[in-house]
Amino acid sequence: MGVLREDARQRTREFTKATDAYVHEHPWQCIGTVAMLSAAIGAISTLAGSRRH
């Protein structure tokens, strides 16, 4: 169990470092992606809420 946990921690560290590097290299693309996802989630929430009534 300890080996699996350490492997997961190592992969998480590598993923975190890669993500951090990408965000620092492409800040505007990341902001645009987050804005698009937020708009999509907001639209889906609005549609779901309007169908309940």
Image (tube, rainbow, N blue to C red):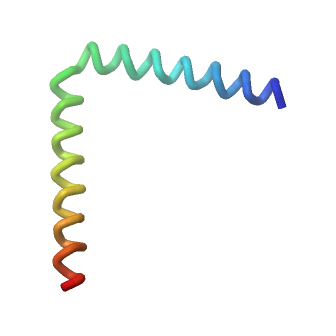
Q: Is 25 left, or right, of 15 in this rendering?
A: left
Q: Looking at the picture, how far across and down is residue 49, in whole percent?
A: 21, 73
Q: Looking at the picture, how far across and down is residue 32, in whole percent?
A: 16, 35
Residue found farthest to the right:
1
Quadrant of residue 21 in the image? top left
The residue positioned 71% from the left and 24% from the top of the image is 7
Q: Looking at the picture, how far across and down is residue 40, in whole percent?
A: 20, 55
Quadrant of residue 47 in the image? bottom left
Q: Looking at the picture, how far across and down is residue 2, in whole percent?
A: 82, 25
Q: Is 40 left, or right, of 22 in this rendering?
A: left
The residue positioned 50% from the left and 23% from the top of the image is 15
The residue nearer to you, when weighing 11 against 5, is 5
The residue nearer to you, when weighing 47 against 36, is 47
Quarter containing the C terminus: bottom left
Quarter containing the N terminus: top right
Residue found farthest to the front:
53
The residue positioned 57% from the left and 25% from the top of the image is 12
Q: Is 4 left, or right, of 49 in this rendering?
A: right
Above or below, 13 against 34 in this view is above
The residue positioned 23% from the left and 64% from the top of the image is 45
Numbered marks: total: 0
